[in-house]
């Protein structure tokens, strides 16, 4: 039973990708899509989903959608703008270094989301993770300050706040 | 500016010109003619012609029709070559096939695992969509099977082979699945012959004037291409399992994969 409950969210995701990739909504697409989605969900559900209740929570899903929109429209643009300024400056004002960034997210998916978000914004790359202590080691293009509370605020705060709301 | 920089810029300009001149002078070759050749016209005219069904394949996708219908025998033999190649590769490792690996790895970091487990679902959806829409879009069994096969190949590295060694998708099950799919590929062309008691053709798809057998031309509400959908599906499963078997064998740890090679240094 638990296996079937865990299968629901992955099945919906597979069905969505199937329909989008096929580019059609005929009855044939819906029937074959459902078969593939349910089979994939039942087989891979336990591998992908830890807690089925969380995976089916609508508020968490809408939070994720808001986060994606915010991330690509605001955070990415800001980070790009900063790196463009550095890149075009003839004096190349960089001060690279690896800093400790403490984060509050505990769940593996949440930490993954934070780490990927940081790496995907230009100027910062996560080079290592310490899951037990909740610390990311980030290679930063311009180290403003090495203090953990400042690095957290500058690099990870927004991502961490959303990630723990979505996954924790 | 240093001399080195000047030389470097000169080199870039030089290489660009060297590549530019032959490209402009005609290594592009004659451009293809705008009008269709007769053979292309023939296929396009016949493949999905609902007004003249004497040679049609009931599939709007002419390339799939050529691959699995007009020259289906050719594709059948290609499949056999691939089948034999994988069997030969597996035979080299026959001593250790199906064994659990001696090294029990834990795979890559949880970030890669979590990221990939979402990509895994998408890869499978895209692969099966390619297989099942082979008669409608460019794609088909081999392409789709190869896409789906990417999922277990990456999973082998990301989750370590322990995931497969202890899962229900065992070596035996994969071989059985593959054999079933290949049996399907052999049976689909023979069914018309059997059902018409010898009055049909091998690889017959739609009805002909001499042979009344026909696979269904539509499935639910889209053109099915008769045998093309079945052949694509079986080919997809065969290719997926073949790649997966090959990689399961290739990614054995050194300790175990050396076993079949024992004695090579003294000529056994």
Image (cartoon, coloured by chain):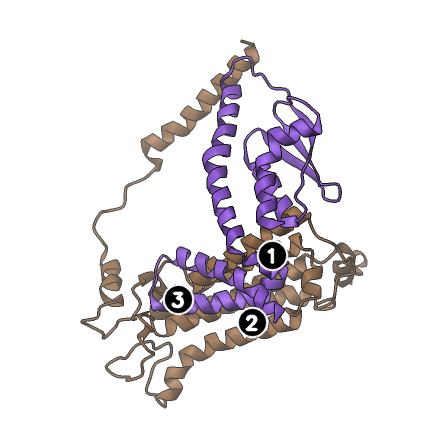
Q: Nearer the viewer, residue A107 or A80?
A: A107
Q: Is residue B104 visible?
A: yes
Residue B33, x across and y down, in percent: 24, 47
In the figure, the brown chain has which letter? B
Q: Nearer the viewer, residue A94 or B24?
A: A94
- Look at 45% across and 21% down and name the residue there: B14
Q: Residue under circle 1? A: B153
Residue A139, x across and y down, in percent: 65, 30
CB of mark 2 within 8 Å of CB of mark 3?
A: no
Quadrant of the rendering where the C terminus of chain B is positioned: bottom right
Specify few, some or many for label 2: CA neighbours under 10 Å numbering under 14, 14-19, or 20 or more.
Answer: many
The colour chain A appears in is purple
Q: Looking at the picture, does residue A94 appear above or below residue B242? A: above
Residue B254, x across and y down, in percent: 76, 55
Query: What distance separates the C-alpha of mark 2 from that of mark 3?
Result: 27 Å
Q: Earlier in the sequence, mark 1 or mark 2?
A: 1
- The reply to whether label 2 and label 3 mark residues of one chain is no
Q: Residue under circle 3? A: A30
Q: Quadrant of residue B38?
A: bottom left
Residue at far bottom of view:
B197
Does B131 sit left or right of B59 as displayed? right
- The reply to whether label 1 and label 2 mark residues of one chain is yes
Chain identifier of the residue bearing label 3 in the image = A
CB of mark 3 within 8 Å of CB of mark 1?
A: no
Labels in figure, total: 3
Q: Residue under circle 2? A: B178
- Look at 70% across and 52% down and name the residue there: B107
Specify few, some or many for label 3: CA neighbours under 10 Å numbering under 14, 14-19, or 20 or more.
Answer: some
């Amino acid at each position: 039973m638990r296996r079937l409950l865990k299968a629901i969210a992955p099945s919906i995701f597979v069905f969505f990708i199937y329909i989008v990739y096929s580019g059609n909504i005929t009855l044939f697409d819906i029937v074959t899509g459902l078969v593939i989605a349910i089979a994939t969900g039942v087989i891979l559900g336990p591998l992908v989903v830890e807690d089925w209740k969380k995976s089916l929570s609508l508020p968490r899903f809408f939070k994720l959608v808001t986060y994606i929109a915010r991330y690509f429209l605001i955070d990415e643009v800001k980070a790009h703008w900063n790196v463009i300024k550095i890149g075009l400056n003839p004096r190349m004002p960089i001060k690279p270094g690896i800093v400790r960034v403490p984060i509050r997210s505990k769940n593996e998916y949440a930490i993954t989301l934070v780490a990927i978000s940081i790496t995907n914004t230009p100027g910062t790359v996560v080079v290592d993770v310490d899951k037990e202590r909740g610390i990311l080691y980030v290679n930063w293009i311009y180290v403003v300050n090495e203090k953990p509370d400042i690095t957290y605020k500058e690099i990870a705060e927004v991502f961490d706040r959303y990630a723990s709301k979505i996954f924790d | 500016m240093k001399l080195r920089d000047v030389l470097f810029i000169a080199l870039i300009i030089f290489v660009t010109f060297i590549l530019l001149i032959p490209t402009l002078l005609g290594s592009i070759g004659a451009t293809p003619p705008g009008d269709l050749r007769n053979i292309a016209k023939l296929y396009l005219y016949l493949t999905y012609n609902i007004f003249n069904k004497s040679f049609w394949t009931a599939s709007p996708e002419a390339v799939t029709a050529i691959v699995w219908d007009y020259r289906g025998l050719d594709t059948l033999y290609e499949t056999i070559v691939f089948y034999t190649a994988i069997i030969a590769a597996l035979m080299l490792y026959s001593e250790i096939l199906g064994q659990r690996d001696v090294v029990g790895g834990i795979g890559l970091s949880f970030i890669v695992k979590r990221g990939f487990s979402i990509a895994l679902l998408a890869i499978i959806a895209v692969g099966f969509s390619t297989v099942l829409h082979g008669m409608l879009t460019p794609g088909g069994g081999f392409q789709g099977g190869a896409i789906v096969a990417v999922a277990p190949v990456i999973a082998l590295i990301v989750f370590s082979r322990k995931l497969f060694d202890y899962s229900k998708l065992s070596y035996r099950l994969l071989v059985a699945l593959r054999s079933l799919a290949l049996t399907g590929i052999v049976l689909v062309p023979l069914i018309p012959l059997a059902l018409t008691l010898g009055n049909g053709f091998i690889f017959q798809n739609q009805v002909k004037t001499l042979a009344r057998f026909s696979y269904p031309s539509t499935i639910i509400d889209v053109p099915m291409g008769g045998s093309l959908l079945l052949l694509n599906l079986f080919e997809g499963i065969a290719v997926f399992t073949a790649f997966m078997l090959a990689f399961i064998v290739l990614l054995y740890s050194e300790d175990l994969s050396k076993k079949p090679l024992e004695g090579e240094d003294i000529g056994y």
